[in-house]
Amino acid sequence: MDKLGERLKALRKEHRYTQEFLADYLNVTRPAIGNYEKGINEPPLQTLVKLADLYQVSLDWLAGRTNVKYNFNLESKENRDAIIKIHEALKGFEIKKR
């Protein structure tokens, strides 16, 4: 199995999605999802973009080009909110030299 297929399968299981759910979401057949996961076929770019958006991961990570999994696209409300929460949580901390 290639890295793309491995990651697609791992993400699907991590999110507890079925192949049927993904097939409906992507408007493809269930066997197409299985073939993507087995590395028999590669999804088209538009499908990869939809999957990266669904899972909130980077396309480069999905394709195995990097080990940086998450895409902190600030256009995403979810990502902006997470960064704001982290910023708020860290505001009260001071870094002191020893």
Image: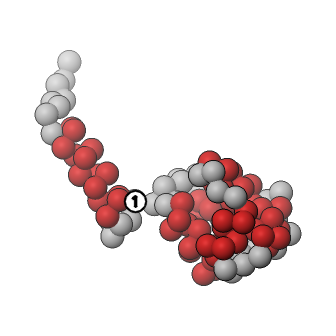
Location of residue 93 by image quarter: top left
Nearer to the camera, 83 or 66 = 83
Crowding at dot 1, Cα within 10 Å, few <14 / some 14-19 / many 20+, comes out as: some
- Type of amino acid at the residue the image marks with label 1: Phe
Nearer to the camera, 29 or 89 = 29
**Measured from the top left, where is residue 14 in percent x and y?**
62, 48
Q: Quadrant of the N terminus?
A: bottom right
Residue in the image at 66% along x and 67% along y: 22
In-image side of 76 versus 51 (left or right): left
Location of residue 91 by image quarter: top left
Q: Which residue is mark 1?
A: 72
**Measured from the top left, where is residue 77 in percent x and y?**
31, 64
Residue in the image at 83% along x and 70% along y: 31
Nearer to the camera, 5 or 54 = 54
Q: Quadrant of the C terminus?
A: top left
Location of residue 90 by image quarter: top left
In-image side of 89 versus 4 (left or right): left
Considering only vertical position in the picture, is 18 above or below 89? below
